[in-house]
Image: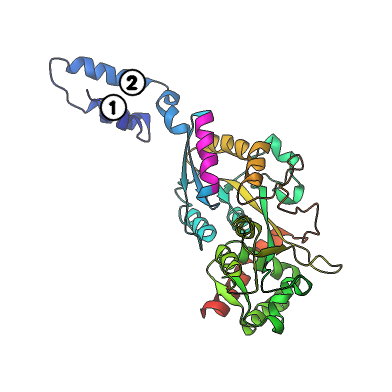
Amino acid sequence: MRSNEILRFARDDTREHTTRKLCDMTYPTPTMGIYRLLVLILASLPLGGCWSASESEVVVYTALDSEFSQPIFDDYQTETGAIVRPKFDTESTKTVGLTEAILAERDRPRCDLFWNNEILNTLRLARQGLLDAYHPPIAEQYPAEFRSPTGLWHGFAARARVLVINTDLVPQANRPGSILDLADPKWRGRAAIAKPLFGTTASHAACLFAAWGDDRAKDFFRQLKQNNVRILSGNKQVALAVAAGQVAFGLTDTDDAIIEQGKGMPVAIVYPDQAEGQLGTLFIPNTLAIVRGGPNPEAARRLVDYLLSPEVEARLAAGPSAQIPLNPAVPPDPRTQTPRTVRPMQVDFESAAEKWDTAAAFLRDEFTGG
């Protein structure tokens, strides 16, 4: 009869507050004494019983596109009975936007688990002390360079930063093979990148600042600007522009390029900088990180265990975006190369995270005017 009120009060912050609220309720006499007795009994039950529903809930700030992540959440809910509440953000700013949300909520976290589709913004949160350590046994199966030694984050299901090339416009003998070709005058006005302020393009920029040093990295991006490289809103838009023949080639992620290939568009993928002495191809993992002080840390740990399983990595690899598995036990999809089949860029992600602010300030000034 008043079960909705009892349930609402049972979710208040403390048992004392719950009891006070419930005991102040008035009920129709003659059964007032019975209701008060029932209320006191409910308030005295162990908190675990009152909180069992909410403790099975996990709030996930999710930068991986909902079309790829939501089906995995749905299956997890079906298999476990848990409730996953994802928060997504816009295509162009999602990684930075979700990171800024976690920073803004630091005094009262709402997020339990951050599923980032790159790594450097995860490391920014770690440097701010906003992540909790967790050491799932399965994490040991992953290469050391793609997981935190202190358990603050776990990398899986990577993407590579690749050149996507329109095969109708660029014959095979003339295909670019390095990110430096973006600055080559022969491609003036015919190449594209995503705005280097968000997502994997911003992470790639910070990695170049760490690998090359500030001066060379700044010079490279100034050359891109001078070469009239088109700056588009996201990596997906780069792949679309190449597929449509609006530009000859561009720098994007494997998932966006592979989706265009799957549509039958005239595009080829080049893993750049494979020659001796070149940088190699940058592989950027998805990352999982538990937010310190989040409402349901145990539910977050259970979901981390599930997402790091070989079954989930295999599913992401076989899906439309062909995410690249990092667990050696998971076979890659034939549509992609891996850090074991091509020369990977050797990256100190911690050093790249230290360069984030420097790179971001320069790129913001250079590409937006402030």
Residue nearest the observer in this picture, 113 or 276: 276
Residue 115 percent coordinates (x, y): 56, 48
Which residues lie in the magenta part?
68-79
> Visible in this render: residue 355?
no
Q: Which image quadrant is residue 344 in?
A: bottom right
Q: Amino acid at mark 2?
A: Leu
- Answer above or below: position of 277 versus 111: below
Cβ atoms under marks 1 and 2 closer than 8 Å? yes
Residue at 46% x, 52% y: name it: 105
Looking at the rendered structure, the secondary structure element under dot 1 is: helix
- Point out residue 242 in the picture as x, y percentages from the top left corner: 61, 69
Residue 232 magenta-highlighted = no
**Which residue carries the number 2 mark?**
42
> Which residue has dot 1 on it?
6
**Which quadrant of the view contains residue 41?**
top left
The circle on residue 321 is none
Q: Quadrant of the N terminus?
A: top left
Give the vertical position of 267 relative to 362 (above or below): above
Up-down: is 276 above or below 317? Answer: below
Vertical relation: 166 (above or below) 1: below
Give residue 163's position: percent from left, percent from top: 69, 66
